[in-house]
Image: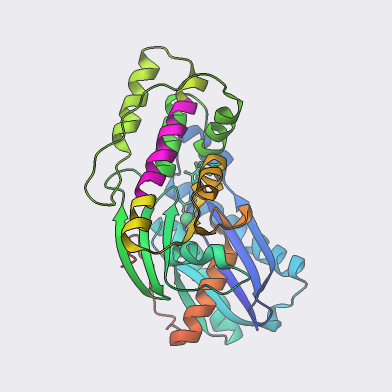
Amino acid sequence: MLVLGIDTSCDDTSVAVYDATGNRVLSNIVSSQYSFHREFGGVVPEIAARKHAENIDLVFDEALRVAGVKVKELSLICTTNRPGLLPALLVGLTFGKGLSYSLSLPFKAVHHIEAHIFSPFIGSEPQYPFIALVVSGGHTLIVLVESLGRYRLLGKTLDDAVGEAYDKVAKLLGLGYPGGPVIDRLYREYGGEFLELPRPRVKGFNYSFSGIKTAVRRLVEKGYPPPQIAASFQETAISYLLGKLKKVVKETGVKRVAVSGGVSANSLLRERLKELGLELHLPPLEYTSDNGAMVAYAGYRRFLLEGEDSLEVGAFARSPIA
Ligand code: KG4
Ligand code: ZN
């Protein structure tokens, strides 16, 4: 059974072909829009939507070509419909529905966070329960996953997502967008001392990243060298993330941990996670940022659980996971 996965929730146009029978991704094409948003220091929803509309045909054709699959061989269309930038989501959703209608194929609308949560298991089968740490440009959450669709939200950020903090810090330092990869690289190159940054005290397993960002702004104003600020920020942000995760593992007794989202590409996060003695599941780098493969993988599993969705399903900018 060949499953198409589409994601246009933010600034990546992505289409993948997933062979559900063989549990194998045949193609996963991502057309990134970074260069169009760079001058604004963040994603502009209307630009994102326009670029998705311009690119989605090409990305779709390329996904089929690389997979070596013909349109009529597809069996299921899965598209992200929530949460995300509304104008951007609508492009992929309309495209997916159009394919489903014209090919008379079942359609499945996919929750973007659910797709991230399961992305570390693409190509294998998830075992339950597990703790999901989702760290992306739009989200930072810790979820206890009891099974597909049964989630307990244990913690989330009360303000900025960790990826958003990376992007804002990079903007303050004049490092461009997206901030994660360049700050990660500067951290690796930096050999000096770290500057002291606050670790916001927030109740329970919740996070707050806005205080760290404000502290970074002060360091910039005081004239500290950008590489030192960037490296200090990464040191603080990652150990803050891991501190709460360790508490969650201790309190729940669940040692199976799956980390996903754009920030899960971070080299320091990966290194430190491996030292924690967990049953750790990390996605390959190509499935960390937004991608169609995770949408096909999660959508197929949802389809098995509850069948197809009506083509009347809409797009939603916000949609809590639990
Ligand atoms: O999952 P994603 O592609 O999009 C959302 O759903 O938000 O995540 C994008 C985020 C950006 O904020 C980017 O700066 C961050 O992931 N990112 C990283 C790294 N690579 C990407 N953050 C830290 N370290 C990285 N190596
Ligand atoms: Zn995402």
Q: Residue at x 59, y 30 (%)?
A: 188
47 drawn magenta: no
In the displayed structure image, the side of residue 86 where residue 4 appears, left or right: right
Q: Residue at x 49, y 27 (%)?
A: 231
Residue furthest out toward the left: 203
> Magenta segment range?
230-244
255 vs 56, nearest the viewer: 255
Residue 109 pos. (x, y %): 45, 74
Residue 162 found in image quarter: top left
Residue 70 found in image quarter: bottom right
- Res. 96 visible in picture: no
In the displayed structure image, the side of residue 244 where residue 176 appears, left or right: right
Query: Where 68 sits versus 201, above or below?
Result: below
292 vs 13, nearest the viewer: 292
Residue 278 pos. (x, y %): 49, 57
- Res. 88 visible in picture: yes
Residue 318 pos. (x, y %): 32, 60
239 drawn magenta: yes
Tell me the quadrant of the picture where the N terminus can be found. Answer: bottom right
Q: Residue at x 47, y 53 (%)?
A: 10
In the displayed structure image, the side of residue 18 where residue 107 appears, left or right: left
